[in-house]
């Protein structure tokens, strides 16, 4: 008997709930909580009340509200698929109630467009003292890309020297401008300065100022831009032989033009303004008028390609490999009614939870994905809709 409480009811949570619901032997009882309880009720109706036993309204900004839910349903694991602003409150609640924790994205303060692991790593001793595990970043990037790195280190290299994570969405949703996950989080992430690791220090670039035209399997060549992404921070910590680590994401010209205009008129700002006597951040208003990412699945065509280029040394020889996954939007919609970006995050959340609940993965404290044995996770990716491939390369595809 394994009971799981999932907090959040957006596109990613919908995928995770549906995937967990199919594994009856492992996820014997599922509970669901969100600020908007009607979304929980809709998911419960879709998968069946015999699988989602109970739903709750909760404001996860407040640890005491999360504690009340945990105390009522008594889960073995809390899966946090809420907003990154809420990570610490949910971790506090898990500590208070002596329950294990998992999330897919690291904490960031609501009033500062900055994300890093320092706030969550600070919980290491508190979780370890209670014999609890807090697994961070069990999505795709972060998440699967971390596990790809650990898998490569275990099976392909004696030392890893260069790491480039690449994320391409080659799909078409037919919208003039839309984000594939929470618009507020997505735009905050994209408009930050770029940041990468080189020779023992972090270097910064202007937002989206460094470009590579990269070929993506089954998609083609796409413009890819250097960004900062949180998995770089933990990977370079746990693989100290890495000399350079970077993250790249593709954007089309139309998307970038829309974003430039929105930035130019202040719509991406997180600084509150006075509107008819109310304080509102322009980005929060923009989020309200943009399409809901969960609504994009119907008619979405094309696929994603997300993977990790790794160069290192094996038996004294330099080699490069690319570990990647292609995920088809239409196939995801047919299976679980979601687009591929939600699917590629929701499935790894389920897999991380499964490995924690069945005891395959357990380590006391605050743990990043690459610290665990990658093999069982990689096997489950193949079994649950995210098959991966390893391609040996003649050389790195990067020109800079």
Image (cartoon, helix red, strand yellow):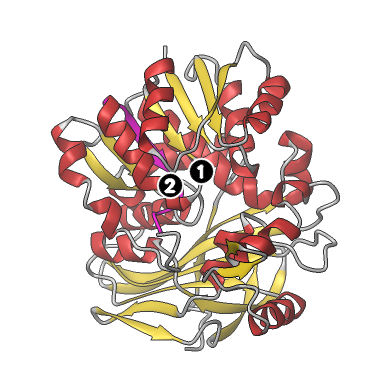
Asked if residue 219 lies left or right of residue 97, the reply is right
Q: What span is in magenta?
A: 98-108
Q: Helix, strand or loop at disc 1? A: loop
Which of 256/395 is in front? 256
Q: Is residue 393 above or below residue 181?
A: below
Which residue is pictured at 54% across the width and 75% down the height? Answer: 191
Residue 238 figure quarter:
bottom left
Asked if residue 22 lies left or right of residue 291, the reply is left
Q: Would you name the residue on which mark 1 appears? A: 82
**Disc 1 to disc 2: CB gap under 8 Å:** yes
Which residue is pictured at 49% across the width and 37% down the height? Answer: 59
Which residue is pictured at 27% across the width and 59% down the height? Answer: 118
What's the magenta bit mostly, secondary-structure-wise?
Answer: loop
- The picture places residue 299, in percent across and down from the top left corner, at 86, 50
Q: Is residue 193 magenta?
A: no
Q: Would you name the residue on which mark 2 appears? A: 86
Quarter the N terminus occupies: top left
- The picture places residue 125, in percent across and down from the top left corner, at 15, 43
Which of 58/77 is in front? 58
- The picture places residue 169, in percent across and down from the top left corner, at 67, 63
For the residue carrying disc 2, how many other residues have a C-alpha within 10 Å: few (<14), some (14-19), or many (20+)? many
Which of 162/114 is in front? 114
Asked if residue 98 lies left or right of residue 336, the reply is left
- The picture places residue 98, in percent across and down from the top left corner, at 26, 26
For the residue carrying disc 1, how many other residues have a C-alpha within 10 Å: few (<14), some (14-19), or many (20+)? many
Q: Is residue 161 above or below residue 239?
A: below
Residue 211 figure quarter:
bottom right
């Amino acid at each position: 008997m394994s009971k799981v409480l999932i907090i959040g009811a957006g596109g990613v949570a919908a995928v995770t709930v549906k995937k967990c619901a199919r594994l009856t032997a492992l996820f014997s009882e599922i509970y669901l909580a969100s600020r908007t309880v009607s979304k929980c009720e809709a998911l419960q109706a879709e998968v069946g009340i015999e699988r989602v036993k109970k739903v709750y309204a909760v404001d996860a900004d407040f640890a005491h509200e999360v504690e009340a839910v945990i105390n009522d349903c008594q889960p073995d694991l809390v899966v946090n698929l809420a907003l990154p602003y809420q990570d610490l409150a949910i971790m506090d609640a898990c500590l208070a109630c002596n329950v294990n924790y998992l999330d897919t994205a690291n904490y960031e303060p609501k009033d500062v467009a900055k994300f890093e692991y320092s706030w969550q790593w600070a919980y290491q001793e508190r979780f370890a003292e209670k014999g609890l595990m807090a697994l961070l970043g069990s999505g795709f990037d972060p998440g699967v890309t971390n596990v790809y790195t650990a898998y490569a280190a275990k099976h392909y290299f004696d030392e890893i020297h260069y790491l480039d994570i690449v994320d391409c969405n080659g799909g078409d949703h037919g919208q003039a401008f839309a984000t594939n996950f929470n618009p507020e989080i997505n735009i905050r992430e994209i408009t930050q300065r770029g940041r990468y690791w080189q020779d023992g220090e972090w270097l910064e670039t202007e937002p989206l100022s460094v470009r590579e035209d990269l070929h993506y399997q089954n998609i083609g060549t796409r413009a890819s831009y250097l960004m900062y992404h949180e998995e770089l921070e933990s990977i370079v910590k746990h693989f100290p032989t890495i000399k350079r680590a970077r993250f790249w994401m593709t954007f089309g010209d139309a998307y970038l033009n829309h974003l430039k205009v929105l930035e130019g008129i202040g719509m991406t700002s997180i600084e509150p303004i006075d509107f008819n006597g109310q304080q509102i951040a322009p980005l929060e208003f923009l989020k309200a008028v943009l399409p809901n990412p969960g609504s994009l699945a119907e008619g979405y065509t094309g696929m994603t390609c997300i993977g990790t280029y790794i160069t290192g040394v094996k038996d004294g020889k330099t080699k490069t490999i690319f570990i990647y996954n292609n995920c088809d939007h239409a196939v995801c919609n047919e299976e679980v009614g979601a687009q591929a970006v939600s699917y590629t995050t929701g499935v790894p959340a389920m897999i991380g939870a499964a490995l924690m609940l069945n005891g395959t993965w357990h380590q006391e404290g605050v743990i990043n994905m690459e610290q665990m044995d990658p093999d069982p996770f990689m096997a489950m990716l193949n079994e649950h809709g995210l098959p991966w491939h390893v391609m040996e390369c003649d050389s790195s595809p990067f020109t800079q």
